[in-house]
Image (spheres, helix red, strand yellow):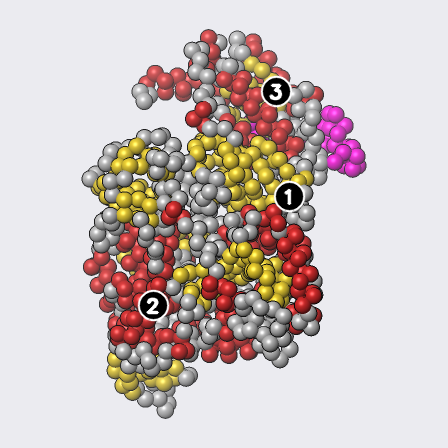
Amino acid sequence: MRHLLAKSLAATDSIREYMAAQEKKSLLRFLTCGSVDDGKSTLIGRLLSDTKQIFEDQLAALERDSRKHGTTGDDIDFALLVDGLEAEREQGITIDVAYRFFATPKRKFIVADTPGHEQYTRNMATGASTADLAIVLIDARQGVLRQTRRHSIIASLLGIRHIVLAVNKIDLVGFDHGVFDRIVEDYRQFSQELGFQTIVPIPMSARYGDNVTGRSDKTKWYSGPTLIEHLENVSVDEAAAELPFRFPVQYVNRPNLDFRGFAGTIASGTVAQGDEVVVAKSGKSSRVRRIVAHGGDLSQAVAGQAITLVLDDEVEVSRGNMLVSPAARPQVADQFAANIVWFDEHALLPGRSYILRTETDQTSATVTDLKYRVNVNDFAHEAAKSLEMNEVGICNISTRSPIAFDTFAENRTTGAFILIDRITNATVGAGMILHSLRRAENIHWQSLDVGKHGRSDLKNQRPAVFWFTGLSGSGKSTIANLFEKKLFASGRHTYILDGDNVRHGLNRDLGFTDADRVENIRRVAEVARLMADAGLIVIVSFISPFSAERRMARELMADGEFIEVFVDTPFEECARRDPKGLYARALNGEIKNFTGVDSPYEAPEKPEIHLKTLGKSAEEMVEALELWLNERDIAEDQYDNGGGI
Amino acid sequence: MNITLTHLQRLEAESIHIFREVAAAFSKPVMLYSVGKDSSVLMHLAMKAFYPAKPPFPFLHVDTTWKFREMITFRDQMAQKLGFDLLVHVNEDGVRDNINPFDHGSNTHTHVMKTVALRQALDKYGFDAAFGGARRDEEKSRAKERIFSFRNAQHAWDPKNQRPEMWKIFNTRIASGESIRVFPLSNWTELDIWQYILQENIPIVPLYFAKERPVVERDGMLILKDDDRMQLRPGETVENRLVRFRTLGCYPLTGAIESDADTLEAIVGEMLTARTSERQGRLIDRDEAGSMEKKKREGYF
């Protein structure tokens, strides 16, 4: 420790010895969590202070700040040491996770101080995702609260197996043994199903330091360890090295034609020169020729090391794939079940397309089924149509292409993923894989002799999906009907999928909530895709207000087959026309969730065809559509005949 | 097989992983090279991450024109020795207006010659990711920052609305004009940095080692008179004292400490007994409370 060393270490040798001793120390990453005002930041300030991690200038700044913003009277307010953002200091709350570092003669520590407010749960999850132990603080006066439960559930889901139950502010209940026992019993009852390996309850006062680093003489009834004793000695080894070899390929290093190395961090297991490895997604196998490192090749490497592998054969491997042990392979699937923690203020909607990111792989994904939401108070499984911010649920997920993974229970690195919003790029959720729903290698698309090309050639046309989007009353159906007539007259094979009509049949079970609108579009997009596969020219006439769903539909179709047609009629004009009398009713509040009135319409940014209808006839609109279609077909004919790819 | 990774091996692996992630996911990354000890470590790690290839991105030095002369010499030597692509950017508007720390104070000088200069350089080359050497143990707003820290098209940081950062799965997606600042040394402490420099024998600017140097005592700090642009105030004298620097920046804003530590071991020994943090030598942090956060929101690293 810093203060012990002064003169004894002046000599070079003793510095070297000291450094060698430092190197042997193990590292423990933990977080503090729990409800607001249970004293998380104060506890960390106390730990830093008692382990002499606070410098004189920092202490002076802290004393100044305590007088200005502090909530502890004349005493130093240790929370100000970790609440590093202006907004946090002004409001006296923790908004985001802070990472602090300290060491004792036995161990090094990285501690994540996480916020207690429910609205910042995502920041608590951020801190928990890299921790091996959680200190759950409880205010002895309050007992187990809703946030105590929520944080415990999230810690459990994220794979934390060791809990310290810090019954804090024990001074404020007169160091009462009975209060402590009741809280511990409550917590043990509640957390039975959470799979924690150790729960160590400690009565403490972070503010006055009781049982933090020194044993308190006011809790003689307590015989367990102090907090720091426990943190120094608890064993959290997961033994990632003992698991099967997993090497997610992060980066292909090709400085010249003679070198092709696969760079990445070993997620689990070990690898040695000469080992056989298998490419997870293709099943191709090869051997490790070299383990390249700056300063000389390695003969072997272990979980946690960032290395570069050179293989014996020119096998196809790119970022997102995995090199694995031939004896114990990961699963490769495009459908699986997972726990999801949702972070975003826009709810998770089944059917909506998100970007799924594992450590190195990325693909599109949709939640095909939200099985249930977990009630954080009693673990009840509740039926739900969407997951709101900070909620936890179990979902079935379908990805566009298969990914290689293990279950999260088997492997915290290869069993985790995040979900990203396609438009805002926000990280909207975190997922922990439970099991695959079916093995991708077992599904083979029926390979039929009659193909899409054959079917459309027979009709002497190319398939297309004209996707009309626009407000109710904008003229979509009128234009679509006229367009189909023209196409029909010129010998094309067509079909119209109309919003109102589909809602009477295929989608009769759906309403007008956001979740139902998404599902409505998903089903129609799938039907349109099948029809395009049958060789038809499909005209979809749907309000389809959300750009995310239109994009999802676009990605279902082959390149060039999806034509977004924006029927652009101003809201005022649609409301004036009001062919079905709906606007009048919506504006009167008789119809809820009406697009353009109390439900948003997200206009397309780059439609293939933009029809501005004001002052133009339906015939003029249809001419524009026909012209577009003819040009595409001519361009594609040229491509087919002369492209030569 | 039974290999237990040391603490430094773990930190090294984490940093290398971050470097590779950026190289794989971004189209135009850059490494901010400030010539200090953390930059030296960062550079060493970048060389390791892509070995046997060179780092697939250039190094950018934002030169305020007030850096210690020895820093500039060292910078050019390293670029030549390691063969990396070095870009140097100076805010020419600031030079034209003769913005300097003596007349304009540390706040204005740092804003114009560092923060604005950095924004200029990032815009000029269109970099979409920029590595920096900041550590979470340095300062309390840095303790709050993500490893992949999102910046909007104006280079601003929104500390109240950071993206969640789960496990080692980094969200590298941005819209055009936006960028990410990346901090591979987030989880290193000052002690780790020195230990690693010692272990790996990493070259650092000689100013870190104690030597007799001409210094002036001003505002309670020892300022090295690095060139004639520094005018003595009445009553001030230049004295040769045995000093070194714990941190390096613009010479008029960086205080020396009296020390006889002239080897790495002695520096580590001194650090272990230190009673003040390394940023104490930096004038810019003391300007006002929360000043680092404010600067970062404006685009400072």
Residue A356 placed where, x, y %?
Answer: 49, 39
- Determine which of the numbered discs, if any, sits on residue A21 in the image: 2
> In the rendered image, which residue does mark 3 sit on?
A497
Residue A81 placed where, x, y %?
Answer: 53, 70
Q: Is residue A236 above or below residue A74?
A: above
- Subunit under mark 3: A
Q: Nearer the N terminus, badge 1 or badge 3?
A: 1
Query: The C terminus of chain B is located in which quarter?
Result: bottom left
Which is more toward the observer, A271 or A292? A271
Does the magenta segment cover residue A269? no
Q: Residue at x 46, y 8 (%)?
A: A458
Q: Quadrant of residue B92?
A: bottom left
* Label 2 CA crowd tier, 10 Å (few <14, some 14–19, many 20+): few
For numbered disc 1, what is the local secondary structure?
strand
Which kind of residue does numbered mark 3 sit on?
A: Leu
Which kind of residue does numbered mark 2 sit on?
A: Ala
